[in-house]
């Protein structure tokens, strides 16, 4: 049996809606400067989670896959921004250097799909979420916090979810 760090939290989703609901809880807990990294194959549910995150955060704009643009920006009534980055088309971390993380992070949280492609340029403290396909409608998500802020975020989330699903 693998030894799991007790700060880690594994969530088993049984439907896209359940993945969205996890996102809503998480979105309600993120603020400027927060970095949420999503790792997993195509169709593993990353964008579905982002839909929930954006809703929980309070985005006025609908989530779309950043197809042509690398970064999508969603607004909130208080003029804050949520940045949605898709690193799929970036070949390596060097390509990500033109992305001005510091500027983005001063204006809002950032959620990154295919974060494993640009690992080298990511801030050291972040919440890492690995997705795996476990069945047609089933996905497992492993949440790994790096840093106190994210440990507290996961802890709060874990408490939120008990009794909610
Ligand atoms: N439990 C689940 N959680 C998330 N998506 C699911 C789940 N079950 C089935 N799906 C489907 O899998 C697909 C996930 O797509 P998407 O979220 O765009 O993945 P990614 O961004 O990782 O490529 C969607 O078609 C969604 O309806
Ligand atoms: Mg996607």
Image (spheres, helix red, strand yellow):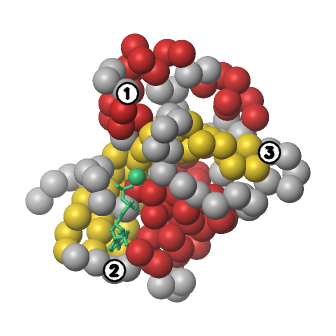
Instruction: Please say if 5 is above or below 100.
Output: below
- The picture places residue 118, in percent across and down from the top left corner, at 38, 27
- The picture places residue 122, in percent across and down from the top left corner, at 47, 26
Label 1 crowd bin: few (<14), some (14–19), many (20+), radius 10 Å: some
Which residue is disc 1 drawn over?
Answer: 90
Which residue is disc 2 drawn over?
Answer: 14
State which quarter of the image contains the N terminus: bottom left
Quadrant position of ligand 1: bottom left
At x 52%, y 85%, the residue is 163
Q: Quadrant of residue 141?
A: bottom left
Front residue of this view, candidates 70 and 7: 70
Element carrying mark 1: loop
Disc 3 or 2, which lies upstream in sequence? Answer: 2
Q: CA distance from mark 1 to mark 3?
A: 26 Å
Disc 2 or 1, which lies upstream in sequence? Answer: 2
Whether residue 91 is visible, yes or no, is yes
Label 2 crowd bin: few (<14), some (14–19), many (20+), radius 10 Å: some
Element carrying mark 2: loop
Give the left or right position of residue 153, taking residue 132 as reference.
right
Q: For the residue with label 2, is its CB less than 8 Å from the closest atom of ligand 1?
A: yes
| Tag in front: 1 or 3 | 1
Q: Which mark is residue 80?
A: 3
Q: Which mark is residue 81?
A: none
Q: CA distance from mark 3 to mark 2?
A: 32 Å
Q: Quadrant of residue 121?
A: top left
- The picture places residue 149, in percent across and down from the top left corner, at 60, 43
Instruction: Please say if 93 is above or below 128.
Output: above
**Residue contact between numbered discs 2 and 1, judged by CB atoms under 8 Å:** no
Whether residue 144 is visible, yes or no, is no
- The picture places residue 28, in percent across and down from the top left corner, at 68, 61
Q: CA distance from mark 2 to mark 1?
A: 31 Å
């Amino acid at each position: 049996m693998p030894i799991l760090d007790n700060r880690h939290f594994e969530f088993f989703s049984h439907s896209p809606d359940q993945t969205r609901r996890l996102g809503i809880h998480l979105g309600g807990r993120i603020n400027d400067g927060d970095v949420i990294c999503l790792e997993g194959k195509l169709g593993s549910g990353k964008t579905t989670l982002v839909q929930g995150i954006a809703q929980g955060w309070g985005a006025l704009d609908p989530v779309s896959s950043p197809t042509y643009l690398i970064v999508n920006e969603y607004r909130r009534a208080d003029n804050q921004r949520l940045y949605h980055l898709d690193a799929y088309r970036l070949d390596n971390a060097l390509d990500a250097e033109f992305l001005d993380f510091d500027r983005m992070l001063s204006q809002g949280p950032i959620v990154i799909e295919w974060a494993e492609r640009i690992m080298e340029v990511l801030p050291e403290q972040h919440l890492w979420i690995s997705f795996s396909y476990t069945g047609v409608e089933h996905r497992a998500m492993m949440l790994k916090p790096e840093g106190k802020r994210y440990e507290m975020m996961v802890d709060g989330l874990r408490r939120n979810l008990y009794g909610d699903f």
